[in-house]
Image (tube, rainbow, N blue to C red):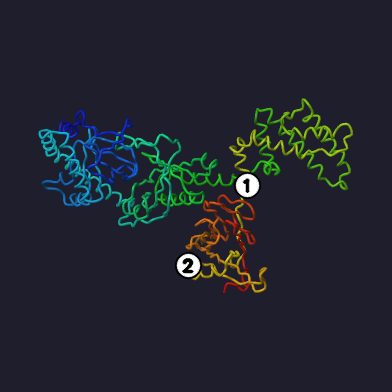
């Protein structure tokens, strides 16, 4: 059999390579004799690429627009039907017919099994490959290949039948033991767009590489529609229809490990993560933090039946920790007693004398601030204590040779020294010195402190877990710019839950009645109810008269336990709650003001038993 394989895989003769453009390898300018999308099987499913037959070389490209690709010499080709002869199992024949668009391509190093979109395309590819071979080999060599295939066919057929029977035996055993449920319908657990990084990698099926444009070092991401299925697979394609019917690729979630790119998430805000499978790693980017969290939760649900759940839950917890530790500034942290204790322990563990001296100066300034706030009527010695602290500050830290480095708070320290001597009557600008120390500590040590467990525990202890809102009708209210136009649009949006309400007692400057847009938020103890905010008319709260509002800007979730959470969905211009920017999610209370684009909305609750203005 090895001799037959050698005949089928015989390499090209000298001069058989297709013409190249310039000196760049794998760039071919000769017109292709056949081109189109083909797929091949991988351990994780199937992968599709765009192929062109140039001369006798089969060139694989990332897509139709790619200028460069990986080439391999196609020595011989034939369809699946060439193997079938004699007494063959009917189920096996039916299986081959289901895969009738497959064909075999022999290269100098291996045999490839490729899949065309249909039987007509398969026959066209085989004919084109055979015709290309006739340009390279003479009649005697082609006859030798045909003879070799004829002699090999029974062996290949027997091997394929044995594998087919073995797989059916394994499947039957799994069904008997309950690992595979018969006729179980595959369901879609989550759908939506993700971006896959298109990086260079060595492919299992070819000895070439996907070539990237060397002019850029930035990782490139290609958008793909993904469907997470209940059979522990993630399929993706250019659209939802493509992903379901003819996916470009399949990711097996069995033995999956999820790894977050902490640097990208924390520094640039890009929600990049890796799906690590035993044979390949997929680098993926989600649109925003909420989307990443929901994909991770869906993966956990999909893999719940597997013994090996990987570390998806750990990755989700890590992401939520990042969210909890985001936006805590040093000044606020050390003004809080528990935060100060954590930072003081961290500074004590350092060997850097400069950081310790700056912190000691800040600590003395903090004592001065606390003493200055004492009530003189209750503490008679307050002024004496303040003067003593000021003297220590100047002598120990601010004078020439003091512990505070000379480049810190230059102007403030001069004022302090001038105010202290000779009379000591003028107030010292201690607050300016304290602020300068905070800025220096931030530059010297805060990034390092944020990596400690003490910092994470402090942030988690301060995280707002939300409280259930009071019983009643939950309502989101905002004032539209053009009530008449909104009323006309709402008439064409039957699914939108927003209604206009006239305020009888209030009129604007021109004497016209003021209207408000009220949206009732559903609540259930059985499931989470969601309300979408955005310019898209499919949103529950359609704010399409504000151009700074994204198509799907934000969402409000009413949780089963009574809490209400606001989530920014990666909007272009961001969101705020009570004036504070929201990067991920924040819990709402009655009376909170939500700011999206240029529109302010008030979240309120109409108590139970009160007449509902919407009815």
Badge nearest the viewer, 2 or 1: 2
- Tag 1 or tag 2, which sits nearer the N-term? 1
Secondary structure under the numbered disc 1 in the rendered image: helix
Q: Nearer the viewer, residue 458 or 614?
A: 614
Q: In the figure, is residue 360 to the left or right of 74? A: right
On the question of residue 614 being in view, the answer is yes
**For this rendering, which residue is in front, 416 or 486?**
486
Count of marks placed on residues: 2
Q: Secondary structure at mark 2?
A: loop
Residue at 56% of width from left, 47% of height from top? 323
Q: Separation of disc 2 and disc 1 at Cα?
A: 41 Å
Q: Quadrant of residue 469?
A: bottom right
Numbered label attached to residue 265: none
Near mark 2 (Cα within 10 A), the count class, few <14, some 14-19 or many ≥20, is: few
**Residue 482 placement (x, y as % from top left):** 57, 66
Viewer-side residue, 416 vs 372: 416
* The N terminus: image quadrant: top left
Where residue 343 appears, x then y in whole percent? Answer: 66, 37
Q: Position of residue 591 (x, y in %)?
A: 65, 61
Q: Are marks 2 and 1 in contact (CB under 8 Å)?
A: no
**Residue 190 percent across, percent down from the top left:** 42, 54
Q: Quadrant of residue 354?
A: top right
Residue at the disc numbered 2: 495
Residue 182, compared with residue 461, is above or below; it is below
Q: Residue furthest top?
A: 401
Q: Quadrant of the C terminus?
A: bottom right
- Say which of 477 and 127 sits in front: 127
Disc sitting over residue 461 in the figure: 1
The crowding category of the residue bearing disc 1, from other C-alpha atoms within 10 Å (few below 14, some 14 to 19, many at least 20), is: few
Whether residue 235 is visible to the viewer of this picture, yes or no, is no
**265 relative to 191 in the view: left or right:** right
């Amino acid at each position: 059999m090895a001799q037959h394989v050698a005949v089928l895989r015989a390499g090209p003769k000298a001069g058989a390579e297709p013409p190249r453009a310039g000196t760049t390898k794998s760039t071919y300018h000769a017109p292709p004799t056949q081109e189109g999308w083909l797929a091949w099987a991988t351990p994780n499913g199937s992968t599709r690429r765009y192929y062109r037959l140039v001369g006798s070389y089969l060139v694989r490209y990332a897509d139709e627009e790619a200028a460069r690709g990986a080439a391999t010499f196609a020595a011989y080709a034939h369809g699946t039907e060439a193997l079938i002869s004699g007494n063959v199992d009917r189920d096996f024949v039916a299986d081959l017919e289901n895969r009738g668009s497959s064909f075999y391509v022999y290269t100098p190093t291996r045999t490839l099994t490729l899949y065309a979109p249909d039987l007509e395309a398969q026959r066209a590819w085989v004919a084109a490959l055979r015709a290309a071979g006739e340009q390279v080999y003479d009649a005697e060599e082609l006859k030798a290949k045909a003879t070799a295939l004829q002699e090999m066919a029974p062996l290949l057929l027997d091997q394929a039948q044995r594998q087919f029977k073995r797989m059916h035996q394994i499947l039957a055993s799994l069904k008997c033991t309950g690992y595979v449920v018969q006729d179980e319908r595959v369901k879609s657990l989550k759908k939506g767009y993700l971006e896959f990084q298109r990086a260079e990698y060595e492919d299992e099926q070819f000895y070439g590489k996907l070539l990237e444009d060397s002019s850029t070092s930035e990782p490139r991401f290609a958008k793909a529609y993904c469907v997470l299925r209940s059979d522990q697979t993630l399929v993706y394609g250019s659209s939802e229809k493509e992903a379901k019917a003819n996916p470009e690729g399949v990711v097996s979630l069995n033995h999956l490990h999820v790894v977050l790119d902490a640097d990208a998430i924390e520094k640039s805000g890009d929600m990049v993560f890796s799906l690590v499978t035993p044979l390949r790693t997929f680098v993926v980017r989600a649109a925003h933090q909420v989307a990443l969290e929901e994909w991770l939760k869906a993966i956990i649900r999909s893999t719940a039946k597997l013994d090996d759940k990987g570390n998806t839950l750990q990755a989700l917890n890590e992401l939520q920790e990042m969210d909890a530790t985001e936006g805590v500034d040093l000044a606020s942290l050390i003004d809080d007693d528990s935060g100060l204790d954590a930072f003081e322990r961290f500074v004590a563990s350092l060997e850097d004398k400069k950081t310790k001296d700056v912190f000691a100066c800040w600590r003395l300034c903090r004592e001065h601030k606390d003493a200055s706030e004492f009530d003189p009527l209750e503490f008679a010695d307050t002024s004496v204590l303040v003067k003593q602290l000021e003297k220590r500050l100047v002598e120990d830290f601010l004078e020439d040779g003091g512990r505070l480095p000379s480049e810190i708070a230059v102007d403030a320290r001069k004022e302090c020294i001038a105010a202290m001597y000779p009379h000591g009557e003028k107030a010292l600008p201690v607050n300016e010195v304290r602020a300068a120390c905070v800025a220096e500590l931030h530059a010297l040590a805060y990034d390092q402190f944020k990596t400690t467990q003490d910092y994470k525990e402090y942030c988690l202890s301060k995280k707002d877990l939300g409280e259930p809102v009071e019983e009643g009708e939950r309502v989101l209210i905002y004032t539209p710019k053009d009530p008449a136009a909104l009323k006309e649009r709402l008439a064409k949006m039957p699914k939108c839950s927003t209604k206009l309400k006239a305020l009888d007692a209030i009129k604007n400057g021109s004497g016209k009645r003021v209207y408000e847009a009220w949206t009732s938020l559903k609540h259930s103890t059985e499931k989470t109810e969601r309300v979408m905010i955005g310019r898209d008319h499919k949103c529950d709260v359609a704010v399409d008269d504000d151009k700074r509002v994204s198509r799907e800007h934000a969402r409000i979730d009413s949780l089963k336990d009574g809490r209400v959470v606001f989530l920014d969905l990666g909007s272009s211009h961001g969101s705020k709650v009570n004036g504070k920017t929201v990067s991920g999610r924040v819990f709402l209370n009655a009376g909170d003001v939500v700011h999206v684009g240029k529109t302010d909305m008030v979240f309120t609750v109409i108590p139970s038993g009160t007449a509902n203005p919407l009815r």
